[in-house]
Image (spheres, grey):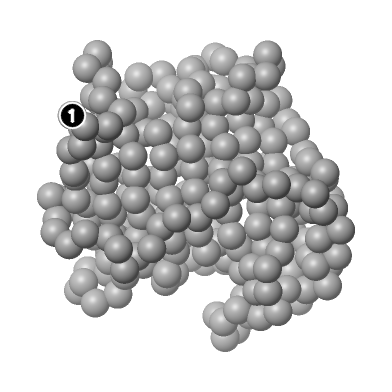
């Protein structure tokens, strides 16, 4: 299997108020290692941009078994995990030096035409990587169906696509979507719950200076808390992404 592994230390700016790796930062770190591997394989953003195409994330699913703490050493892993028609899959993992699985993720990507902002066939350079995927079992599948999300809203928070949220393709980064989804929740909720799982489906890109509302519906269940999310434009007419998250209660909030 074609895998890249990189050892890092969780720094202060990676951690949240409780000193644990934040979800948005985890996605940023996944992007960093993915970019490093795609450069080596010649399927990176810069190479694609020169051809008038680029990568665009369609969906991601993440499970967190234990969020590493500030000062902890971890190993980030990523590998291409298959292709299916217009989609290319990439998996990630975070493990401790002792081999403890801390988090894992699977993601689904498209290649789009930069001028038309429409998906195109996967380039041959991407399809050739399929040979490395033979025998690879993706341990996570996608489950979120936007049509099954319940109606109703517990609350919302408005965000602006400011300069620091925009990537080199001049739209909001996928990790910023994750941040807006999770950070819309009240501080007290986040301080007393631990994220166990998150799945996001990206539907429409967000352009600079756009205002969006991150809506959430909290449902208390015996096994924990489930939250449904939608990020919509300021008018409510366009859905930019939908998501679902699972949280464990933690009564020892700071």
Q: Could you say where residue 196 lies in the image, as x and y percent from the top left?
A: 40, 34
Work out whether residue 246 can be spotted.
Answer: yes
Against 200, is 8 above or below? above
Identify which residue is drawn at 60% across, 25% down: 101
Across the whole image, how many numbered discs are drawn on residues? 1
Residue nearest the observer in this picture, 73 or 163:
73
Q: Nearer the viewer, residue 238 or 129?
A: 129
Q: Which residue is mark 1?
A: 188
Which residue is rendered at x = 33% and y = 39% of the image?
Answer: 246
Residue under the point 26% across and 46% down: 227
Quadrant for the C terminus, please.
top left
| 25 and 93: which is toward the camera | 93
As drawn, is 170 to the left or to the right of 47?
Answer: left
Q: Residue at x 70, y 79 (%)?
A: 121
Q: Is residue 153 left or right of residue 19?
A: left
Residue 7 rendering spot, x and y as whole percentages: 70, 25
Q: Is residue 90 above or below residue 182?
A: below
Percent of width and height locating residue 139:
61, 43
| Above/below status of 58 relative to 97 | below
């Amino acid at each position: 299997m074609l895998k890249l592994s990189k050892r890092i230390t969780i720094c202060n700016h990676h951690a949240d108020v409780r000193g644990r790796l934040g979800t948005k930062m985890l996605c940023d770190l996944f992007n960093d290692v993915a970019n490093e591997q795609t450069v080596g394989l010649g399927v990176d953003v810069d190479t694609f941009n020169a051809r008038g195409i680029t990568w665009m994330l369609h969906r991601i699913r993440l499970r967190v078994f234990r969020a590493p703490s500030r000062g902890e050493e971890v190993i980030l892993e990523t590998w291409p995990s298959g292709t299916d028609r217009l989609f290319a899959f990439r998996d990630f993992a975070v493990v401790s030096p002792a081999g403890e699985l801390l988090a894992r993720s699977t993601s689904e990507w498209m290649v789009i035409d930069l001028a038309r902002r429409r998906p195109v066939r996967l380039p041959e350079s991407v399809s050739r990587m399929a040979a490395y995927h033979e025998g690879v079992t993706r341990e996570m599948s996608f489950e979120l169906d936007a049509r099954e999300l319940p109606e109703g809203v517990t609350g919302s928070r408005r965000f602006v696509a400011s300069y620091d949220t925009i990537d080199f393709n001049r739209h909001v980064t996928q990790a910023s979507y994750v941040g807006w989804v999770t950070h819309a929740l009240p501080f007290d909720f986040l301080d007393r719950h631990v994220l166990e799982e998150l799945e996001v489906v990206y539907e429409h890109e967000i352009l600079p200076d756009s205002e969006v509302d991150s809506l959430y519906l909290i449902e208390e269940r015996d096994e924990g808390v489930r939250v449904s999310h939608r990020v919509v434009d300021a008018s409510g007419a366009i859905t930019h992404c939908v998501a679902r998250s699972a949280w464990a209660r933690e009564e020892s909030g700071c």
